[in-house]
Image (tube, helix red, strand yellow):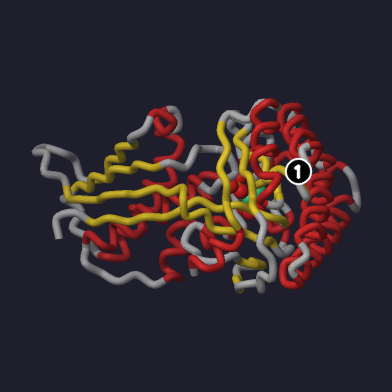
Amino acid sequence: RSVGTGRAHAKLILLGEHAVVYGAPALALPVPQLSITASAGFSTRGGEPAGVSFTMTGSAWKQVETQASEGLRRLTTDFRASMGIDDARHLDVIIDGSIPLGRGLGSSAACARAVVLALFDLCGREVSERTTFELVQTAENVMHGKASGVDAVTVGATAPLLFQAGEARTPDVGCDALFVVADSGTVGSTKEAVDKLRESFRRHAGTQERFVRQASDLTREAVAALAAGEPAALGSLMTEYHGLLRDGGLSTDRIEAMVGAALAAGSLGAKITGGGLGGCVLALTQPERAREVTQRLHEAGAAQTWIVPLRRLVTHA
Ligand code: PMV
């Protein structure tokens, strides 16, 4: 094969981000409408030294090219070693996609998964989910320190997931509602957010245990509300979870304005999603309020918004 291709999509964390790093459960959703594709080929350019070149297209990607490619480079080295690829051959990988970076939507994990799939496809080899997960985690750990793995699994999932300590299962979904995802327009560094929280836990005795306990309780209650078809209860739990993240210092003025605007417009619940310190707000709403919620989020500073229907994610599976 002369070109291998791979694709992965974005993800949203409904509840459980940050606590999942400490072994708590997290509820996550795949977002099929935002994705990244990678194409890999052996270089045809003469005199290219053995190794790998990444070309990222799309303006948003340019600024982080070097940072993102560090993890991808490590992943590719592990791939070469495991496949016994002749060191003299250079790899060219082209990455393109619609997932905005650093917004808590799993762009780095999606990018890594697309590259893994493209590399195996290039070699005409099947790859197991376990190997894919491990290679994506290699890149994630370079980028983020120690990643929980929730992003690595969800960017390849076809249904909502309950993830805990490396294991994922599909929760029951008994209700329909819409999620409005609103981009604050600012990049939040997941690594910085995870480090900030860890440092705050270190300085204040007992806070880590309390955060993990409260977060786990809210996530478990959300799993029950989702299964029982109670979107209003699910929404309140999301807003409560936002309170935990805000108290942990992970919100920003713009995020607070956006969460407030979504709630004032009749959302059932609203919160940061993902690492925080910027990134996106996730609001749960009944379909008839979606227009109003979206408009108010834009007025509060959202740079762009997307609608993710819960039901479609389930039937997508
Ligand atoms: O910001 P994102 O999309 O990378 O989400 C990361 C989720 C965290 O729980 C904050 C980190 C992790 O490793 O699970």
Q: Is residue 98 above or below residue 210?
A: above
How many callouts does the rendering have?
Answer: 1
- The residue at the point 67 percent across, 61 percent down is 27
Residue flagged by tag 1: what amino acid is it? Leu
Q: Position of residue 170 (x, y in %)?
A: 60, 72
Characterize the local packing of mark 1: few (<14), some (14-19) or many (20 or more) Cα atoms within 10 angstroms. some
Q: Nearer the viewer, residue 65 or 182?
A: 182
Q: Position of residue 125 (x, y in %)?
A: 25, 69
Q: Position of residue 294 (x, y in %)?
A: 65, 37
- Secondary structure of the residue carrying numbered label 1: helix
Q: Residue furthest left?
A: 46
- The residue at the point 83 percent across, 44 percent down is 243
Q: Which residue is mark 1?
A: 197
Q: Is residue 226 above or below residue 291?
A: below
> Is the residue at mark 1 in contact range of ligand 1, meaning its CB lies under 8 Å from it?
no
279 lies left or right of 230: left
58 lies left or right of 196: left
Can see residue 147?
Answer: yes
Q: Is residue 258 above or below residue 214?
A: above
- The residue at the point 32 percent across, 65 percent down is 82
Q: Residue furthest right?
A: 205
210 lies left or right of 161: right
Q: Is residue 18 above or below residue 171?
A: above
Q: Position of residue 254 (x, y in %)?
A: 72, 28
